[in-house]
Image (cartoon, rainbow, N blue to C red):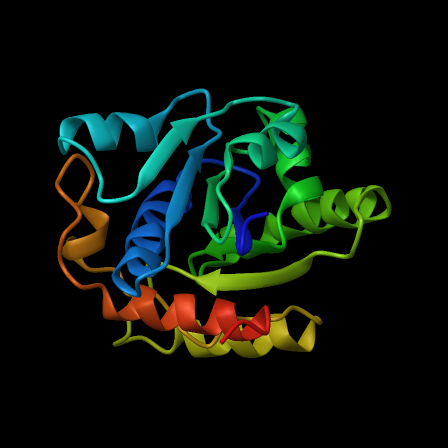
Amino acid sequence: MSLLTIALVNLKPGTGKTTSAVWLAHAFHELDYPVLLVDADPAASALEWSDLAEGFPFRIIGMPSKELHRRVPEVAKDDEVVIIDVPQMEDHKGIARSALRFADELVIPVAPHGIEINRMSPVLEEIEDIQPMRKAPARVSVLLNRVNRSSTAHTETREDLTEDGWTVLEMTIPFVNRYSQSFALPVKARATEFEALAQQLLKRADIS
């Protein structure tokens, strides 16, 4: 049984799911956890990234399946942290719902912009609809991604989302070339923001 399963989900593409999934997987690896990255997107962006980078230092598999909730437990090793890069919900609803049904933590990466915030309601509706099919309720959190730290937009977005009842993760991911332009490059550098994020997700799961 895997130690922890985290799915990165959103309604549309372009929200930084794949970048976040890869760097979060790398962060857990740097923290000495065995990691399985599941590329559930038919576009296979994470797998392509791994190929172009001549491999990642952790396991990665492709599984764009509506039966993901049944198939991942068959391949995940004991004590692995499983990170699932979920395809955009609007185009691959069946795969996305399977991930929602399975993962312990559902992380919604969003930039602090109104248009992305407005897209969160359909995601929440899907999560609420799938909860009765789960063995236990999923933890749901928002990751503020591609943040310009010289602006106050992320602070205001955090306040608005918190007032609306969302759990907003403490760590934010900055909009920097190290992440935004890392596709196809080897993932080797220490990612302090993602390591802090990994630690928070472990704490939320009550894993020391």
Position of residue 179 measured from the top left corner of the image (x, y, whole percent): 22, 53
Q: Determine if residue 157 is in view.
A: no
Q: Is residue 46 above or below residue 31?
A: above
Question: Which residue does the image show at 63% across and 76% down from the upper left?
Answer: 162
* Residue found at the very far front of the displayed protein: 78
Give the quarter of the image for residue 175: bottom left
Q: Is residue 109 above or below residue 194?
A: above
Position of residue 130 measured from the top left corner of the image (x, y, whole percent): 79, 42
Q: Determine if residue 81 is in view.
A: yes
Give the quarter of the image for residue 51: top left
Horizontal side of 10 relative to 44 (left or right) equals: right
Horizontal side of 124 relative to 156 (left or right) equals: right
Question: Which residue does the image show at 25% across and 61% down from the upper left?
Answer: 30
- Of residues 57 and 171, which is closer to you in this image? 57
Question: Which residue does the image show at 15% across and 27% down from the upper left?
Answer: 52
Position of residue 135 measured from the top left corner of the image (x, y, whole percent): 80, 49
Position of residue 47 measured from the top left corner of the image (x, y, whole percent): 31, 28
- Of residues 8 and 32, which is closer to you in this image? 32
- In the rendered picture of this protein, how many numbered marks are placed on residues? 0
Q: Is residue 160 above or below residue 120?
A: below
Question: Which residue does the image show at 14% across and 34% down from the upper left?
Answer: 53
